[in-house]
Image (spheres, grey):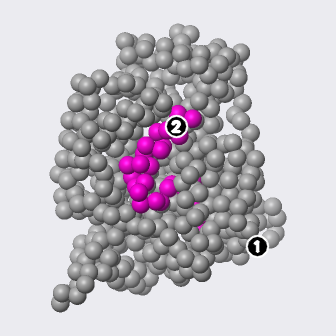
Amino acid sequence: MRAPALYTAAGSLLLTTLTVAPAGGAPAVPGAAELHGTALAAARAEVAGIAFGKCAAQEDLPANVECGTVSVPLDYARPDGKQIKLTVSRVRATQKDPHNSKRRVPRQGALVYNPGGPGASGMYFPLIGVVPEWKRLAAAYDLVGYAPRGVGRSAPLSCQDPKKFFKAPSQAPTYPSESYKKERIARAKAYARGCARSAGRALPHYNSLNNARDLDVLRAALGEAKLTFMGASYGTYFGALYATLFPSHVRRMVFDSAVNPDPAQIWYRNNLDQSAAFESRWADFREWIAKHDRVYGLGDTAEKVQRSYDKAAAQLAVEPAGGKVGPGQLQGSFLTAGYYDDYWPHRAQALSAYLKGDPKQLIQQAGPHPEAAAEAENASSVYTAVECNDASWPTDWKVWNRDNTRLARVAPFETWDNVWTNLPCAYWPAPRQQALDVRTGAGELTATLILAAERDAAAPYDGALELHRRLSGSVLVTERDAGTHGIGGGPNRCVNGHLDAYLLEGRLPVRRAACAPHPEPKPRAAR
């Protein structure tokens, strides 16, 4: 269940408690040792701070971005044990009003951002301050990004040789054969073994609960008495965990494209719901292409567009484009269009050109990029470890096969690809945790803001409704009839108005608000 990161920059979801038995035979208290360990680590971080300076060359960040590290315990139950370092990036608040150069804007502290994943890095987030939609926030806040544990240079996790990560060309059967399923089961088992072999005893500690604890240590290291945080996609899940565990530490919190935090959904059922939602979003995309048939010539109905897509997939199965774009790469590239509709013109144009005999655009958009293999493999490893560690998964292949065979009859586009992404969790060697019941009562938590697009496929809208029910005092802003994943700071001025009012002034609608959808993308004629 994966989400590409920030809307304008640049991949789902869970938490748990550990039961620790105190010395002397006292009754076990869920998470007591970890809570103490977090407080101790945060106190140390507050004293140490972060020595911001020039960013390492590997970060590939411009000179105006500062970088540093913060130390956190690998295991919060043993805060004096092994420490790992998380990389952090920052651009200081400009304190310049973008609409009045003579007016100085008061600094409001640090705004920490997480783009989701699990497995996505937020190190590039501070660059967003130059985008017009973000300039007011960049004036008031230090923009702070970081790489969560396991990601990038933050105690990196790897489950396989990056050189073997991009297997291309690959197939993507809508209705896989039994032999294909057996092949994918074997690959999932091997991948899970690779994670265990690489991480060793550290493997169980890559989880959402520790991501929430790390966030509190980062808050303290930044010198912030209370946290101002914006999380997208999976970032909303451990943000909700943070709000549940540390409600008195929250200043302002934004949940953008919220995932469903119901413990019964984490993670297996959230992935089933995501596959179903992608089918609806794929239909939206096909209808848009059909509306612009004069431009693309792929069919004047969604059904005809589907046939054009199927024709391309069949041709690629026989003769991969450029020797490296098969049906799997085609499906992956069109899946990203389910996240962001500004990809629609590019994908439609590439498909149209390919079917007319020119594969160059399709190869460019869908082909694997070996130079990105290490980063992609790392993100995949962290994604897998966090989701597998977070909750119980079915361990019987018959359950996966039954549920997804049934779902694929009505939602074939993404269902089996989602299975293969998550199947290592059926054979995971580390202990499973029990999902935390995310919930706050009246007066426990300051008012928070939830942003959601009504037709979001990666984080279906029911998740935002569920989070709204669980966080007392939260306010939900919905972008109607739209499906972009990650809407804060995007093209919708109404959404951005609510975001700015909250983060800059602490001002929110009474309980819910709705925004009209942002304009549909304009078609681009084939070159």
Q: Is residue 270 magenta?
A: yes
Q: CA distance from mark 2 to mark 1?
A: 45 Å
Task: List the residue tagged with mark 1.
Answer: 104
**123 or 414, nearer to the observer:** 414
**173 or 225, nearer to the observer:** 173
- Residue drawn at x 24%, y 36% is 185
- Residue drawn at x 62%, y 68% is 474
Q: Which residues are magenta?
A: 252-280
The amino acid type, in three-letter code, at marker 2 is Phe
Locate residue 210: give its quadrant: bottom left
| Residue lying at the far top of the rendered structure | 357
Task: List the residue tagged with mark 2.
Answer: 278
The amino acid type, in three-letter code, at marker 1 is Arg
Locate residue 170: give its quadrant: top left
| Sooner in the amino-acid sequence: mark 2 or mark 1 | 1
- Residue drawn at x 60%, y 81% is 443
Q: Secondary structure at mark 1?
A: strand
The answer to whether one can see residue 200 in this image is: yes
Mark seen at residue 275: none
The answer to whether one can see residue 491 in this image is: no
Q: State left or right for residue 189 relative to residue 455.
A: left
